[in-house]
């Protein structure tokens, strides 16, 4: 398998929370679940808008494993915003099968100084 092409159009310099969100996005898109799960709170809640929330670290990891068939060939991150215990990222993924998805993920951490994710709300749009 070829490595994924990354286009990151945001400056994460000297912004640890932005770097973490960038890294988490890369981990999720490349299905590096071991690294991604290190940052999830045991009671994390993931809401893929339009589906029922997935509650707990184990069920979240299981849901991601089910999606592993169609891998991303290219990831573009347009912006990452952080404030206190919240963060957001938006971008686009081009999958190996040629399909393209736009996404926006909104994160809530357990506290402003924490790297443990409490909630993720994801919006995904199939573009082509």
Image (cartoon, rainbow, N blue to C red):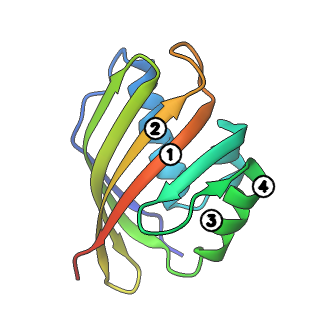
| Mark in front: 3 vs 1 | 1
Residues at circles 3 and 1 in contact by the CB criterion of under 8 Å = no
| Mark in front: 3 vs 4 | 4
> On the picture, is 118 further left or further right than 78?
right
Q: Earlier in the sequence, mark 2 or mark 1?
A: 2
**What residue would you read off at disc 2?**
107
Instruction: Assign a secondary structure to mark 2.
Output: strand
The mark total stands at 4
Q: Which mark is residue 64?
A: 3
- Give the residue at x 43% y 63%: 4
Q: Position of residue 34 (x, y in %)?
A: 72, 50
> On the picture, is 96 further left or further right than 125?
right
Instruction: Assign a secondary structure to mark 3.
Output: helix
Q: Position of residue 100 (x, y in %)?
A: 28, 75
- Give the residue at x 21% y 42%: 9
**What residue would you read off at disc 4?**
58
> On the picture, is 69 further left or further right than 55?
left
Q: Nearer the viewer, residue 114 or 119?
A: 119
Instruction: Assign a secondary structure to mark 1.
Output: strand
Q: Position of residue 72 (x, y in %)?
A: 43, 69
Instruction: Assign a secondary structure to mark 4.
Output: helix
Q: Earlier in the sequence, mark 2 or mark 3?
A: 3
Residues at circles 4 and 1 in contact by the CB criterion of under 8 Å = no
Q: Position of residue 40 (x, y in %)?
A: 66, 39
Residues at circles 2 and 1 in contact by the CB criterion of under 8 Å = yes
**What residue would you read off at disc 1?**
120
């Amino acid at each position: 398998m070829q490595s994924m092409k990354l286009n990151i159009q945001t400056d994460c310099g000297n912004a640890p929370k932005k770097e973490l969100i960038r890294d988490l996005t890369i981990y999720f898109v490349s299905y590096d679940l071991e690294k991604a799960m290190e940052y999830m709170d045991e009671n994390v809640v993931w809401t893929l808008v339009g589906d029922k929330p997935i509650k707990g670290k184990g069920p979240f990891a299981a849901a991601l494993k089910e999606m592993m068939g169609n891998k991303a060939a290219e990831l573009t991150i347009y912006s990452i915003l952080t404030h206190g215990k919240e963060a957001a990222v938006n971008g686009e993924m081009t999958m190996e099968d040629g399909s393209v998805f736009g996404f926006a993920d909104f994160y809530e951490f357990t506290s402003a100084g924490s790297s443990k994710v409490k909630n993720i709300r994801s919006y995904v749009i199939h573009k082509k």
